[in-house]
């Protein structure tokens, strides 16, 4: 009979059954800061609430430069795209 429980992540004994000796008899827990504890679940990606479209011809590359600033209007908006600099350009 296995008289201990081991950590499912790192295998270290975290709980053991003491049935002899001079000390207290019974289950002894040995909690530890597990070095291999699973990483916290990643937050689900937040759906951007803005349109994010870029000006035609400026779609590639990092969003650097006034012409690459994406549209800040809400997703699915009507009318022209508009960036944070109030530049507007037509949809499509
Ligand atoms: Zn562990
Ligand atoms: Zn837009």
Image (cartoon, helix red, strand yellow):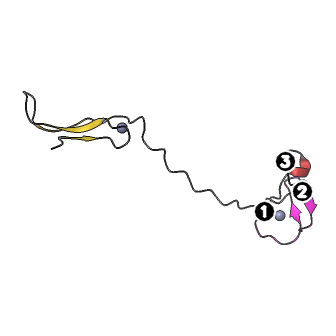
Mark 1 vs ligand 2: CB below 8 Å:
yes
The reply to whether the magenta stretch includes residue 40 is no
Q: Which residue is mark 3?
A: 61
Residue at 18% from the left image edge and 42% from the top image edge = 2
Q: Residue 61 in the image: x percent, y percent?
A: 84, 47
Query: What distance separates the C-alpha of mark 2 from that of mark 3?
Result: 21 Å
Task: Say which label, 2 or 3, has the lower sequence index.
Answer: 3
Q: In the image, which is nearer the foreground, mark 2 or mark 1? A: 1
Compare residues 66 and 24 and report the one nearer the observer.
24
SS category of the residue bearing label 1: loop
Q: Which residue is mark 1?
A: 51
Badge 1: few (under 14), some or many (20 or more) residues near its Cα, within 10 Å? some
SS category of the residue bearing label 3: loop
Q: Is 15 left, or right, of 20 in this rendering?
A: right
Q: In the image, which is nearer the foreground, mark 3 or mark 1? A: 3
- Pick the quarter of the image with the N terminus: top left
For residue 90, which quarter of the picture?
Answer: bottom right
Compare residues 50 and 39 and report the one nearer the observer.
39
Task: Say which label, 2 or 1, has the lower sequence index.
Answer: 1
Badge 2: few (under 14), some or many (20 or more) residues near its Cα, within 10 Å? few
Q: Which residue is mark 2?
A: 86
> Where are the magenta residues, as a range?
71-92
Q: Residue 39 in the image: x percent, y percent?
A: 48, 44
Ligand 1 appears in which quadrant?
A: top left
Mark 2 vs ligand 2: CB below 8 Å:
no
In this picture, is 47 found above or below 31? below
């Amino acid at each position: 009979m296995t008289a201990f429980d081991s950590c499912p992540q790192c295998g270290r004994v975290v709980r053991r059954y003491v049935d002899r000796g001079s000390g207290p008899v019974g289950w002894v827990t040995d909690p530890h800061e597990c070095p291999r504890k699973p990483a916290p679940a990643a937050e689900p990606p937040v759906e951007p609430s803005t349109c994010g479209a870029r000006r035609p011809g400026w779609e590639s590359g990092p969003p650097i430069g006034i012409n690459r600033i994406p549209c800040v209007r809400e997703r699915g908006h009507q009318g022209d795209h508009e960036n944070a600099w109030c530049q507007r350009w037509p949809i499509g």
